[in-house]
Every structure is written in structure tokens, then in C-alpha cells.
Image (tube, rainbow, N blue to C red):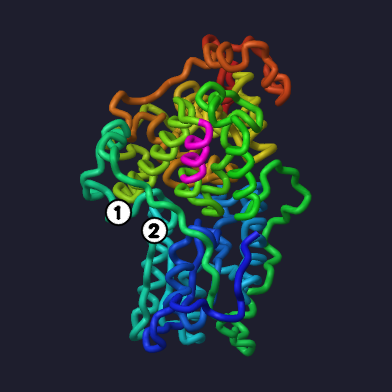
Amino acid sequence: MIKANVKTSPTGDVTTQQQKVNALYWLGDDLRIADNPIFADIAKNAEQLMVVYCIDPQWFRSDQYQAEYVGKYKLRFLLESLRDLDDSLNQYGQQLHIVYARAQDCLPHIIDTHNISRVYRSHHSGADEQAAWRGVQQKCSDSNGIQFLTLTTQTLFSLQQLPFHLDTLPATFSQFRKRLEGIDINTPSDAVSWLPPMIALQSQDKQLQEWLRYPKWLPQTHMMSNVFCGGETQGQLQLDSYFASNLAHNYKVVRNELDGWEHSTKFSPWLANGSISARQVVSALRRFESQHGANESTQWIEYELLWREYFHLYSQKFNSRLFRFSGISGKKPLTSFYAQRLQAWKTANTPFALVNALMKQLNDTGYMSNRGRQIVASCLIHELQCDWRYGAAYFQQQLIDYDVAINWGNWQYLAGVGADPRGSRRFNLVKQQQTYDPLGHFIAAWQGREALQQVEGSANVSLDTVDMADWPTA
């Protein structure tokens, strides 16, 4: 747990009084204090501070792809992460204010009524998150003197560190990785030792008090079981425990396994909401390699962090094109919308036992292995011939480690409308089962054959019981 000096500021840790500001920190996917340059800047330059996280009611409404932005498992992990961050902030004499409203609706009001002169936000790669940031600024445009500052907290590199401009992002990951060779990754910073005092809330502000009240519409999550526990404290524990073992030396061998806690790093949920940083993972990896030696497996862990980096830059460059049916290629895939097939995929009732088992795992835990995600995505796109965006949106709802750039970038990749020059990726489901579950243990554990009425395989399988006019098929 972070130890903080909450009474006095360390000598030389702040700038002159004339430069002090009343700061508001609007949190996003940066739910940590250690290795957080925003808290570091606040400690130097702010006189008072308000820390805010906005939970948007629209997150829990179905979108055009029949999915919500936040499902029950992701919500529970988020609330645990926020609670842990609040506990840490309390040690600094600070508090996390959770506001149940759209940021564009509530933040301008809070900024105006609390004499905020600087607003901090982590630089985000998502188009919707960038639009929300612009929306807050536009609503505050009549207020003179307010500074809006973004800093890089989610990636290994800032845009200024890259050897190319974002507009010239390499077209493939291989080219991207080669361009980054020789560029140092900054060492993660420690947690700040001091934060400025809280800005007192306006107790007579009825609108603010309404936004701060725990809403009845927020889904209940306390009865769910899940192996992941959110928060910076748990994220650091997972980071420390993983590299305290020898698992990193075997990572590449086991990373494609469908189940098992030890078969991947399991850092992704905490990385996704910023409870730990990518730089902290690299730093821990470097320490492990210095003590125990590097091998192909340890290099593969860094390789996958670079894939994460690439998708974040990809998302920034292509912005809303990340969500287009034709992706960045401009070529629409030969799929459509089949309501019955999509529902069968979501509810683990397809003709494919392995896919069913994987989807049950997702629905029951909020998590699925990387290999599993590729298998079920390929099935939806190629076997069931459905619009890939419905699958990406369902993952957005279900996955506790949902990351907008990685999720939508990977779905584009598999649908053949993204960064892969070789086109779409179609997995042979029979071969995948023979390779990764030859004895059927995973399928049995997750009851993948329960809904099957036909022989497993991709040939001669009836996918529909109704035709395009909803008439029953023979």
C-alpha cells in the first residue's frame, strides 16, 4: 500500500505560489497513483485538488450493436478499482468523487462552481473519449483562464518520443516494431509523496449532490464471483507475484492455453483501466531478466506490450474508422446481420463445442484467453458470417479487460479490414480443438457440448432454423 505524507509538502517539490492553480483531475483509464505523471504535475503545481471519476448512465443502455458499454463483471472490477484508489487518496488527505453523469453535463458545472483553473486528463486513444474531452472544453469555452492539460499515462511512449509522426504510423506491426528498436522506455516513477488539499464541495449545490448520489439504475454486482479483483493494490500484487515465480521463462510455451491462471500474465485487466502501467510491467520484466536471464518467452512478453502500443497508436490515427464496417481498408467484408446466429454465439448455442465452451467461460467470468478470443471471433465472422462489429461490441460489454484500441483493432485484424496485409484470418475450428483441447477437457469443464445436437465440425451444419422472413426452415 502507498505510504504518503499528508501534512507537509517536501522541500523543493512545488513551484512558486504565483503559479499555483485549483486543479480538477478527471480520471479515466489511469486509476493509480504510482507512475502517474498527472499526480506528479499536480503535486508540483496545484494549490488545491478535486479528483473526479464520471460514470455515464448511457454506459448501461444498449447501443446499435445490441450491447452495453459496461457489463456486470467489468462494472464490478471498475468499482473495486475506484474503491482502492479512494483508499489510497485518503492517505493523502484526498478523496475520489464518483459522479454519476455524463462528463459533458456535469464537469463544466463543477468547474464553474468550484473555481477550477486547470483540468487534467490522461491522453486517450479512443475516439469517444477524445470527443468527450473536447465536449467538456467547448462547454467551458466562455470561462476565461481555464487550462486543459493532457499527459501520457497509458502507453510506453508519448507521441513526442516516437521516431515518426502519427500520420506516418507504419502500416504493419512488424514495421512498427523495427522502427522502435533502440528507443529507451522510460523508468516508471514512484508514487508522489504529497498531494494538495481537497477543494471543498459546495454543500448547497443540489445538482451536484444529485450527481454524487449512488443511483438506483446502477446494476448490482456484489453477488458475482470473479477471480480478478480490481485496483492498484491487487494489480501490483499480481505483477510482483508473477515475476517472483519462473512463469515468465515459460510464457511463450503456454500462452495459447485456453484456461489456467498460470498460462498468461493476467496483467490485462489492470492495464486496461490503468491500475498498473505498461512501463511498470516492462520495469518488472527487466528486473526479472537481470536476475534470472532473458529468453524467448520474456522477449515475447515485451513483444505483446508493443502490440498493445501499436493498437493504441492505430486507434489515435484512424479515430472513428476503428468502428467502421469497412475498417481502414475501405472494403466491406462479405458478412451480414443474422440475428439468430448472433444470439446463438452470444449464448453459447452454436454448432461448435469449443466456441460454446469459450463463450460460456466469457459469460460466466468476464474473461477469455487470447487464443480463445481469436477462435470465437473467427467463428462469428467466417462460420456464422455475421457483422464483426456486433462481436466487438459484445466483447466491449463482457470483458473486464476491455481496451477500446486493442479490442476493436483486433476485431478489424481478424475481419480483414485492419492492419493485416494478408487479409482476414479464418481459423479451422476442428484443428483448433485438436491442437488446444485434444482430450476435450476444456469443453467438458465449460459444458460446450450441452447445446449440440449435431456432429462437431464446420461442414454440413445447419446454422439457422428460420429463413430471412422468419419462416421456419425444414
In this rendered view, identify the residue nearer to me: 228 or 5.
5
Residue type at mark 1: give it.
Leu
| Residue situated furthest right in the rendering | 223
The picture quadrant where one finds residue 453 is top right
Name the mark on residue 159: 1
Percent x, y of residue 334: 37, 27
Q: Is residue 380 left or right of residue 323?
A: right
- Label 1, label 2: how many angstroms apart (C-alpha)? 9 Å
Q: Quadrant of the C terminus?
A: top right
Note whether 357 is above or below 398 in the view shown: above
Q: Within the magenta stretch, is there residue 291?
A: yes
Q: Quadrant of the N terminus?
A: bottom right
Note whether 117 is above or below 29 in the view shown: below
Note whether 236 is above or below 8 in the view shown: above
Q: Is residue 275 left or right of residue 162?
A: right
Q: Is residue 365 left or right of residue 119?
A: right
Q: Secondary structure at mark 2?
A: loop
Q: Which residue: 65% across, 33% down? A: 261
The picture quadrant where one finds residue 418 is top left
Percent x, y of residue 432: 53, 16
Residue type at mark 2: give it.
Thr
Q: Which residue: 61% across, 80% down? A: 7
Read off the residue under disc 2: 152
Residues shaded magenta? 283-292
Q: Which residue: 45% across, 30% down? A: 300
Note whether 149 is above or below 305 in the view shown: below
Q: Secondary structure at mark 1?
A: helix
| Residue situated furthest front in the rendering | 291
Q: Is residue 469 visible?
A: no
In this rendered view, identify the residue nearer to me: 395 or 12.
12
